[in-house]
Image (tube, helix red, strand yellow):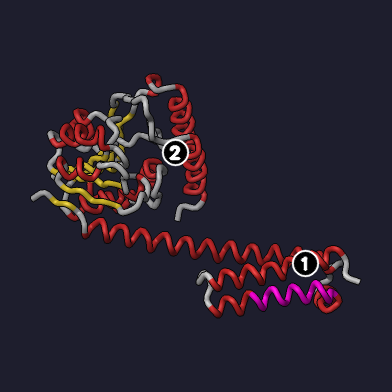
Amino acid sequence: MVSGIQAAVMIFAVVMVFITYNYYRRNHLDKKDLVLWTAAWAVLFLAGLFPQSISFLVQSLHIERGMDFFTIAGFIFLLLVVFYLYSIVFRMQKKIERIVLAVAGKKAYRKR
Amino acid sequence: MIAAVIPAYNESKRLGDVIKKTKKFVNRVIVVDDGSKDNTFDVAKKNADIVLRNVVNMGKGFALKAGFEEAVRERADAIVMLDADGQHDPAEIPKLLAGLKKSDFVVGVRDFSKMPFRARFANNILTLIFRVLFFMNAGDSQSGFRAVKTRIYSRIKWKSNSYGVETEMLANAAKKKIAYSEVPIKTIYHEIYKGTGVTDGIKILLLMIRWRLFPW
């Protein structure tokens, strides 16, 4: 019997697979990203369908319930994503600054 | 050689007049058009000696940085910075330059009592917090009318791309113990004010705390 929370996790995973594929079709993701993200959603789907499959992990980490494990893992994952996005934005900003400066210098008007 | 750096964003109406007045007191006027959507660039080109154009709007701090770098390339001995919206009277540039005889960094200090209430409140709070955090008796941490000797530019160079630039310059000067002085300047506010807003004020406040706690 699939519980409500299990169903929610599985539906979420299926929707995310669909969204990921759509992103790939629009060229917002490449093939490598498609495979990686689809694998991640597949793992989530399976963990929702067979929650006992992660019980060894939950027990070895001394966590009471499977849901607690997902919450903690999700939070850690979110922190990682935020850090990753921050570093990307920072690098992009520096690149934009260099480009704007270079263009401004090249197109500068100098009265001589 | 004295250079003036004027960052400008959508200031075609007042910029021409500001440049003409500024030219009387400096050798080079450098305007940085920060991705304006009006004809600021054309006005600047007609009046200024050097015009840089950012293809997109990057913020006042970035535009100033571009202008200062250009002034350094032009081998300026001192750089005056002022706003393009006519909030600073170029006729007061000689006062700032006179201040450079006894210090390396001069800030024009406005009379807070002549400011609209919101601006007076914000400037008082930010300046007070600046004094407490950086142990510097600054009279107006937000004033954008300043003169700097080019040789100390690398020591007060800022990272802020936006309105935090004035505060960061001053904070760097305080930390590096740069010889600093102030001169009183006129307080001019136009009906349409595009400067620091409430959100910018809060950001500057948070940045000040960051610069104090994490100076690197």
Disc tally is 2
Given the image, on which type of amino acid does mark 1 rest? Val
Asked if one can make out residue B2 in the rendered structure from this viewpoint, the answer is no
Relative image position of residue A42 (x, y in whole percent): 71, 76
Relative image position of residue B148 (x, y in whole percent): 25, 43
Q: Does B34 sit above or below residue B91?
A: below
Q: Residue furthest left?
A: A112
Q: Does B157 sit above or below residue B141?
A: below
Residue A99, by quadrant, is: bottom left
Residue topped by disc 1: A9
Relative image position of residue B125 (x, y in whole percent): 49, 31
Is residue B68 rendered to the left or right of residue B45? right
Looking at the image, which is closer to me, A17 or B110? Answer: A17
Q: Count neighbours of disc 2 (C-alpha within 10 A) and say few if under 14, some if 14 to 19, many if 20 or more.
A: few
Give the residue displayed 22% in from the left and 48% down from the top. Answer: B150
Is residue B46 rendered to the left or right of residue A103? left
Q: Which secondary structure class fits the magenta region best?
A: helix
Is residue A41 magenta-colored? yes
Report the magenta residues as a range: A38-51
Q: Are marks 2 and 1 on the same chain?
A: no
Q: Chain of mark 1?
A: A
Relative image position of residue B196 (x, y in whole percent): 42, 36
Disc 2 secondary structure class: loop
**Residue B135 image label:** 2
